[in-house]
Image (spheres, grey):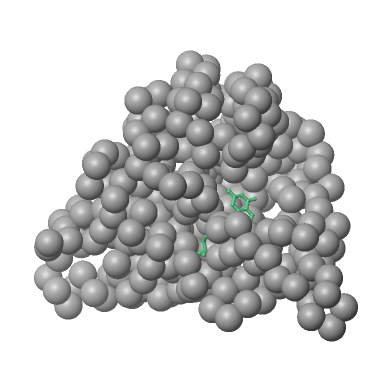
């Protein structure tokens, strides 16, 4: 059974990975031999300098999902490369590094720093950062997406994946801008803008007031976005958004995703991604599918 997929020049041994910010350093809960079975690992987004993140509470559970407002808490790129990366490379699977910044220049600096880092196979641009000129997120603006992806592609020796926000009217337009700028793939979706209010004191539950919704509640919407982008662009897609089971993952692959990333599910079951991988294999065996590529985009409409 062939499970390998390719993004840019990089071969992944199978299409299952984890979503940024939901899995990073969970050896405590999940055995290293299991983690090593994954196609890739995507740690928490890293920025140029340390970020303390948002005030707590940062997470709230909702019906069929959770809202988070972590605020990209991280120790900065130099600490990541010296302290965190060696812990991740010991799993002997490729690391896709998610990066974010406040300016194009900072993104370029980050990309250059990552160029020679062994073990990092690709960069994921978390474009859910503000486009300072327009006070929108970069991925809410096709022109800003084009400009930023192009700037990073110019300096980056590794495949570049543009991570899109679902908080737009036309996500296909943003994916097309990323493709035109040379992105090797897009990943989607990031979380949906959301909030929760405590009616006892009429205060927002989250310290940041608003946050992003993830989990099963968003799956059908994410699935349609993946389907639309695949149909219109045929570019490689890493899909995420409420993937809890292997059936969910299969839906995304059939809709056109080349890879699937498990996020919120890992909070419920740290082994979810590994179980999803084995469920995909069982489905392929049962349906006599020899190569995962036969499944990708195989929707019959
Ligand atoms: C607690 C938490 C932290 C997250 N942190 C990041 C992050 O640092 N960078 C990023 O690109 N996405 C981040 N995300 C979004 C996920 O990577 C993913 O895109 C989203 O949660 C949808 O997938 P899911 O429904 O399977 O969780 C975070 C999500 C959660 C729940």
Q: How many callouts does the rendering have?
A: 0
The residue lying at 63 percent from left, 62 percent from top is 194
The percent coordinates of residue 130 (x first, y second) are 66, 36
| Image position, residue 79 (x, y; %) | 77, 38
- The x, y position of residue 52, in whole percent, is 84, 47
Left or right, 262 with respect to 234, comes to right
Q: Quadrant of ligand 1?
A: bottom right
Residue, x 79% and y 57% (percent of image)?
A: 208
Q: Quadrant of the C terminus?
A: bottom left
Q: Is residue 74 above or below residue 254?
A: above
Query: Residue sitting at 64 percent across and 45 percent down?
Result: 45
Residue 41 visible within the image: no
Residue under the image location 34 percent in, 34 percent down: 176
Q: Is residue 3 left or right of residue 187?
A: left
* Percent of width and height locating residue 92: 51, 50
The one nearer the camera, 57 or 38, is: 57
Say if 164 sits above or below 152 in the image: below
Please determine whether, in this image, residue 117 is positioned above or below residue 300. above
Quarter of the image where the N terminus is located? bottom left
Position of 16 with respect to 155 (left or right) is left
Which residue in the rendered view is the most extreme toward the top? Answer: 154
Q: Is residue 61 visible?
A: yes
């Amino acid at each position: 059974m062939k499970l390998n997929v390719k993004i840019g020049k990089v071969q992944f041994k199978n299409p299952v990975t984890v979503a940024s910010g939901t899995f990073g350093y969970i050896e405590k809960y999940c055995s290293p031999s299991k983690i090593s079975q994954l196609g890739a690992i995507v740690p928490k987004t890293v920025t140029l300098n340390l970020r303390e993140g948002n005030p707590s509470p940062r997470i709230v559970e909702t019906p069929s999902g959770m809202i988070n407002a972590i605020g990209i808490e991280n120790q900065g790129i130099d600490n990541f490369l010296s302290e965190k990366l060696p812990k991740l490379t010991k799993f002997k699977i490729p690391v896709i590094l998610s990066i974010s910044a406040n300016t194009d220049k900072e993104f370029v600096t980050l990309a250059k720093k990552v160029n020679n880092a062994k073990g990092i196979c690709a960069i994921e641009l978390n474009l859910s950062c503000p486009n300072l000129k327009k006070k929108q997120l970069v991925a809410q603006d096709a022109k800003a997406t084009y400009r930023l992806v192009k700037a990073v592609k110019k300096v980056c020796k590794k495949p570049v994946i543009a991570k899109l926000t679902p908080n737009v009217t036309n996500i296909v337009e943003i994916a097309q801008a990323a493709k035109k700028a040379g992105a090797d793939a897009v990943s989607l979706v990031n979380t949906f803008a959301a909030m929760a209010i405590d009616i006892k004191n009429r205060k927002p539950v989250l310290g940041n007031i608003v946050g992003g919704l993830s989990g099963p509640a968003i799956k059908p919407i994410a699935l349609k976005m993946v389907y639309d982008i695949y149909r219109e662009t045929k570019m490689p897609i890493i899909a995420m958004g409420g993937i809890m089971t292997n059936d969910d993952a299969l839906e995304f692959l059939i809709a056109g995703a080349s890879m699937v990333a498990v996020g919120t599910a890992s909070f419920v079951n740290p082994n979810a991604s590994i179980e999803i991988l084995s469920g995909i294999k069982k489905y392929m065996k049962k349906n006599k599918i020899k190569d995962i590529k036969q499944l990708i985009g195989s929707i019959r409409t």
